[in-house]
Amino acid sequence: MADTTRYARPLGGAATVTLTAADAAQTITVTNDLTMVDGVTNPISVNVTLTADIPAGLQVGAMMFMQATSVGAQTLTFGDGFSPRTVTGVAGKTINGTLIYNGSVFTPLAARVQID
């Protein structure tokens, strides 16, 4: 039986999660097959470790899009729920990344891209 507690693309919009600027440990609660992580509204001002709270029944192929800006060379470390890696920011620059759920963790599709 299909999981009806979340919207599945292409019928539902992306769930949006906004990161906070000064929290060193942040959890992204995945509630949708398409998640947008906003790390631009509140530029990161400390080193951050992100974890993903992945619900049972999340479908392989679920996508997560991330945008983040930092005020300096802060690091963004991907912890539980992600393929481990660390990204170092550049002051005032925005980076984008796309991750895909492989049935176990979210893993990057390619290297991050700095867009400005």
Image (spheres, rainbow, N blue to C red):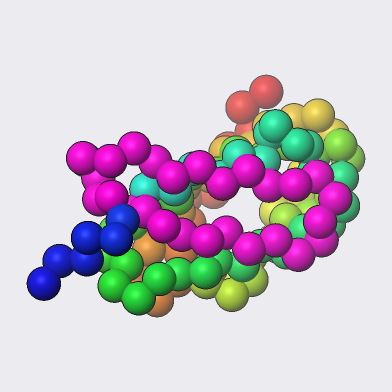
Q: The N terminus is located in which quarter?
A: bottom left
The percent coordinates of residue 57 (x first, y second) are: 29, 72
Let me know if residue 9 appears in the view.
yes
Q: Quadrant of residue 113?
A: top right
| Magenta run includes residue 27 | yes
The segment highlighted magenta reads: 7-33
Q: Residue at x 29, y 61 (%)?
A: 5
Q: Quadrant of residue 116?
A: top right
Viewer-nearest residue: 59 or 31: 31
95 lies above or below 75: above
Q: Residue at x 78, y 37 (%)?
A: 43
| Magenta run includes residue 13 | yes
Q: Is residue 59 left or right of residue 25?
A: left
44 lies above or below 91: below
The percent coordinates of residue 19 (x first, y second) are: 68, 47
Q: Is residue 89 left or right of residue 27?
A: right
Let me know if residue 90 appears in the view.
no
